Image (cartoon, rainbow, N blue to C red):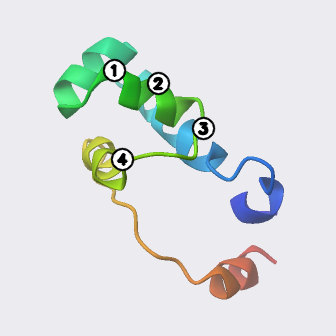
Amino acid sequence: MGPIKNNKLQPMKPLADFVKEKRNEVKLTQEAFAERAGVALTVIRKIEQGKENLNLEKVNQVLKMFGHTLAPVNARELSKNED
């Protein structure tokens, strides 16, 4: 099963895991990564903790460091692809 079905109680977990994994791949501390991404350290911490109340501009600023961005996804199509 994919992230939506597996994380009903933690909807931000896939984002949190992605950012933490990518940050660790480039061997940066949260502090160093925040500085490079141009965001406050608290932004990185909130994302990696799976907090739900996030500024989407800041999230996109962080994701842009990995060549990604937030975008709408058709949940029905996503679930079809997971089956």
Q: Residue 1, which numbered label? A: none
Which comes before the other along the chain, label 2 or label 4?
A: 2
Can residue 21 be seen here? The reply is no
Q: Residue 45, which numbered label? A: 2
Which comes before the other along the chain, label 4 or label 3?
A: 3
Q: Amino acid at mark 3?
A: Gly
Q: Residue 41, which numbered label? A: 1
Residue at screen point 37% across, 48% down: 55
Residue at screen point 28% across, 53% down: 57
Picture coordinates of residue 61, whole percent (x, y) = 25, 46
Residue at screen point 36% across, 47% down: 59
Residues under labels 4 and 3: Cα distance?
Answer: 12 Å
Residue at screen point 81% across, 56% down: 6
Q: Are marks 4 and 3 in contact (CB under 8 Å)?
A: no
Q: Amino acid at mark 2?
A: Arg
Residues under labels 1 and 2: Cα distance?
Answer: 6 Å
Q: Are marks 1 and 2 in contact (CB under 8 Å)?
A: yes
Residues under labels 4 and 1: Cα distance?
Answer: 12 Å
- Which residue is disc 3 drawn over? 50
Element type at marker 3? Answer: loop
Residues under labels 2 and 4: Cα distance?
Answer: 11 Å
Residues under labels 1 and 3: Cα distance?
Answer: 14 Å
Picture coordinates of residue 8, whole percent (x, y) = 80, 57
Can residue 53 be seen here? The reply is yes
In the displayed structure, would residue 29 be above or below residue 2? above
